[in-house]
Amino acid sequence: MKKRKRLNPDERFEQIIKAALCLAEKTHFYYIKMCDVAKKAKCSEALVRHYLGRAAVMRLHVLDQAIKRKREVIIKQGQQWDLITPKGRLRSKFSERIKSV
């Protein structure tokens, strides 16, 4: 059995969000699954859920981080789904949900 590496919360969040962003760029932010993010981040699904919330909130985190990191492919995906304004901001009702997590 492999021993998992213990990371501080900021490092773990970064590891998980990088995995999620990578998967979103390859497929589509809407179709990423927690189990795939966990596998890519080499952590448990429970840990992904702890840091990113349920699947719908996870997708919003991915869009939010894509905007902050200027990941154009994912931003365009969000614009196609009419979740992101032309200025690159999540609509207010979605950004409020992200802040509450």
Image (cartoon, rainbow, N blue to C red):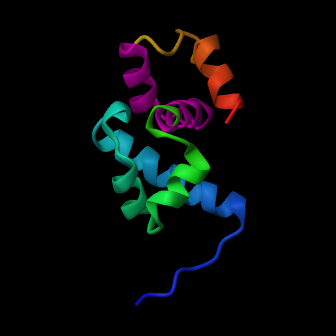
Task: Please give the count of numbered marks on the rendered protein.
Answer: 0
The main secondary structure of the magenta stretch is helix
Q: Residue at the location (34% across, 42% down)?
A: 32
Q: Residue at the location (43% across, 87% down)?
A: 2
Is 23 placed above or below 63 here?
below
**Residue 40, percent from left and from top:** 39, 61
**Residue 5, percent from left and from top:** 58, 79
Q: Residue at the location (39% across, 31% down)?
A: 73
**Residue 44, percent from left and from top:** 46, 65
**On-image quarter of the N terminus:** bottom left
Using the rendered view, name the quadrant where residue 36 is placed. bottom left
Residue sitting at the far left: 27
The stretch drawn in magenta includes residue 22: no
For the residue pair 93 and 24, the one nearer the viewer reads as 93
**On-image quarter of the C terminus:** top right
Using the rendered view, name the quadrant where residue 89 is placed. top right
Is 46 placed above or below 94 here?
below
Is 16 placed above or below 89 here?
below
Using the rendered view, name the quadrant where residue 99 is placed. top right
Residue sitting at the far bottom: 1
**Residue 82, percent from left and from top:** 42, 10
Q: Residue at the location (60% across, 55% down)?
A: 14
Magenta span: 58-81
For the residue pair 20 and 58, the one nearer the viewer reads as 58
Q: Is residue 68 left or right of residue 23?
A: right
Q: Is residue 24 left or right of residue 70?
A: left
